[in-house]
Structures are given as C-alpha cells and as structure tokens.
Amino acid sequence: MELKRNMKKKIYYIWLILFFFICLTIPVNALTIGEDINYDVGNETYCIDNGTMIFSRIIIDATWIKFNNTGFNISSTNNITIRLVNLYVNPYVYIPYTSILRFKANTTGGTVYFDITGFKPTREYHIYKNNTLYAIMDSDSNGHLNFSNSVWSEYLFDIRTGNDTEFHQTTNLLIEDLLTNILPILIIITILTVIIWMVYSGAGSISEWIILFIITIIAIITVYILTTL
C-alpha cells in the first residue's frame, strides 16, 4: 500500500514537471497589429502592409524600432514609410535559401541607409529588390546587415539566407550550432532518463525530488534562452 502511494506521488511530480515545461514552451502572442496602426521613429513610419501580423514584443527607441527580434535602424534625409510584409518567427535561425524578412520602403528621394539587426552573425544573406537580386553580403559579428538605396519609388526588399554549407564553417560556428540545436535535446533526454530511473528504481526522497524539480526548471529556462536568442 505504501509503495502504491509513493508511486502515485512520483507520477504526480512527473506530471507537474511536464506541465511547467509545456507552459514555458507555449508561445505567447502579445500584440496583433493591423494596417491602421503606425509607429513613428523620427521621420520613419512603420506599419503593416496588408492584413494583420502578430508580435510577441515591439520596442521603440528614439532612433530605432524592434519587432520581435528584428530591429530597424534607418537613416533617411526625407520621410520614409516602411511596410512590413513578412517577418520570420526567429531570424537568428539560419535555414539556407529561406526568406527571413520582407518589407516595402518608399520615400521621395535621397540615399537611405538600412541597418537591420537580429540575424545570425557572420552568415551570408541575399537581398532582393522587387524580386531581383540586389546584393549579397555577410552579417557582421553582431548580426547586423547594412545596405543602402538611392533611386526611389516603392520597393519590396526581401532578405533571404544564402547557403553557408561551403563557407564560414569555423569552429566557433560549429560550437554555436551544437549549443543551439543539440544541447537542449540532450538536456531534455537526460532529465527524462533520470526521472524514469527514479520511478522504476523506487529511489528518491521528497527532498531529492525538489532538487530534481529545481534542476529541471533551470534546464528548461536554459533551453528556452538558447533556442530564442
């Protein structure tokens, strides 16, 4: 009878841990923005091109704006309008030949300098203007892409990943990919293995389960940070 009660307690703790894990992995969509909402940053106006878009956060500063993890720092002598067409969930994730960001830009003239942030550092990106290849460049060590345009009507800019399987595969990048993609899986597998062992071996006092619970929460937070940077 006592063994059954202990088993029920351990199963309860397992479900509790899994519940917290599920809560932390469910995306929270905080803001739904439509075409009628504008954000002004200096002489720049940002809005949605068509329909609505959902963001987890929008941060506005005196000279820049950030939608989720994608930041815009634009320098223009004339008023300029930026219309967001499509924004990849996490532009830091590098999948070859994938459209990461699409936006329309329109101003009356002059050279406009774009500094767009949130990309994976030192990776190749292709910039298309009205579906024609405009530039190929690498993001810098901080994940910035910098380019300019001086001949104006309304243009659609499409930033796509290149193919870095043959380039930039340095030791640092390989370690970074390992930490981002493999380490979270190993952490989860290790935790589940320990839980299964404790249940079937009958091991573990309440204090040991509390310690395991705390370790699990720390591991889940670590996984979350590594996969959403």
Image (tube, rainbow, N blue to C red):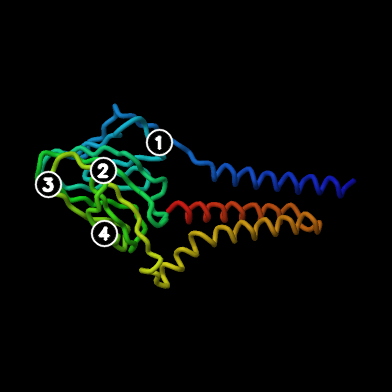
The CA span between labels 2 and 3 is: 28 Å
Q: Amino acid at mark 1?
A: Ile
Residue at the outermost right position: 1
Label pair 2/1, CB-CB below 8 angstroms? no
Q: Tell me which label, 4 or 1, sits earlier in the chain.
A: 1
Indicate which disc, 2 or 3, sits on the residue closer to the N terminus. Answer: 2
Q: Nearer the viewer, mark 2 or mark 1?
A: 1
**Residue type, numbered disc 2:** Asp
Q: Provide the residue designation for mark 4.
A: 136
Q: CA distance from mark 4 to mark 3?
A: 19 Å
| Element carrying mark 3 | loop
Q: Which mark is residue 54?
A: 1
The answer to whether 225 appears left or right of 135 in the picture is right
Query: Left or right: where does residue 90 sit relative to residue 102?
Result: right
Viewer-proximal residue, 160 or 37?
160
Lower sequence index among marks 4 and 3: 4
Q: Which residue is mark 2?
A: 61
Q: Which residue lies most toward the top here? A: 36
Mark 4 vs mark 2, CA separation in Å: 29 Å
Q: Is residue 145 above or below residue 27?
A: below
Q: Amino acid at mark 4?
A: Ile
Mark 2 neighbour class, 10 Å CA radius: few under 14, some 14 to 19, many 20 or more: few
> For the residues marked 3 and 1, what is the alpha-carbon distance in whole angstroms?
32 Å
| Residue mark closest to the camera, 4 vs 2 | 4
Marks 2/1: CA–CA distance? 20 Å
| 104 is higher (above) or lower (below) than 135 | above
Residue 206 drawn at (x, y percent): 74, 52
Q: Give whichever of 122, 160 is nearer the camera.
A: 160
Q: Amino acid at mark 3?
A: Val
Query: Is disc 4 placed on a helix, strand or loop?
Result: strand
Q: Which residue is mark 3?
A: 151
Q: Does label 2 or label 1 sit earlier along the sequence?
A: 1
